[in-house]
Image (spheres, rainbow, N blue to C red):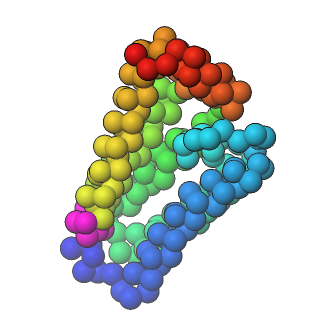
Amino acid sequence: AFRALLTPEDIHSLRWAQVWFLMSQYASMLMYYLGTAERPPKFPASISYTGTRGIPKYCFLLLWARGWCSVLSVMLRVGDVVILAFAAQMVATGFVTLGFNRPGQSARENLFHFVAATAYVANHILFSQVLNIAGAYRVVFYLSFALTGTAMRCTQAIKASLGLPKGYASTPREWDAMLKVAAARGPS
């Protein structure tokens, strides 16, 4: 029903929103690895980590907000109250997830970030149905979500087997120290 109401201009705006959202991820990651937030950069590092401070964070938030402006302009024209409310809470969840995440935060703050990030991803699953996104794209998204979860569980299992702390390394120095301990202990 929603998709049937879209004009060619709406579709154009949604395509641009996709570009803005992708650019928010790629540009902020590029800015991070160019050393604008810390030197040396941590590698590998998640989007959640690379977008925690400095130019990468503001680059991410600016481009992400621009993407949402494109989406919301269409939602305001075509969406009903339920769709608008859902989109508004999705923006709020995303902002909380991304805007308040920082390196070196407490275990409680990490848990809050994890829960908010999971909710934001779940929102994408529902929103892709509202937008009637092609099934192939949804399957790829679901698989990437499952792969991320699997990688996180595997990381925890490896750390436990090596006697490393459960928490995530918050700096490149902490990450290097964990890698040295893991290399010294070797595979179990």
- Mark count: 0
The N terminus, quarter of image = bottom left
Compared with 18, 38 (above or below) is: above
For this rendering, which residue is in front, 33 or 117?
33
Residue drawn at point x = 62 percent, y = 53 percent: 29
Report whether residue 132 is seen. Answer: no
Q: For the point 44% across and 54% down, which residue is it?
A: 88
Residue 60, percent across and down? Answer: 62, 55
- In the rendered view, does 106 fall on the left or right side of 154? right
Q: Where does residue 164 sit, x and y in percent of width and height?
A: 52, 15
Residue at the farthest bottom position: 8
Q: Residue at x 34, y 69 (%)?
A: 79
Splitting the image into 4 quarters, where does residue 169 fall? top right
Q: Tell which of 86 and 40 is nearer to you.
A: 40
In-front residue for pair 185/25: 185
Which residue is painted at 25% across and 58% down in the image?
A: 139
Can you see residue 185?
yes
- Which sits in the foreground, 96 or 162? 162
Q: Quadrant of the C terminus?
A: top left
Q: Residue furthest top?
A: 163
Q: Quadrant of residue 130?
A: bottom left
Whole-percent x, y for residue 154 in the image? 38, 29
Seen in the picture, residue 145 relative to 137 is either above or below; the reply is above
Residue 150 position by quadrant: top left
Left or right: residue 125 versus residue 176 is left
Q: Position of residue 25 (x, y in %)?
A: 56, 57
Instruction: Look at the image and say whether residue 178 sits in the magenta stretch.
Output: no
Q: Which residues are magenta?
A: 129-136
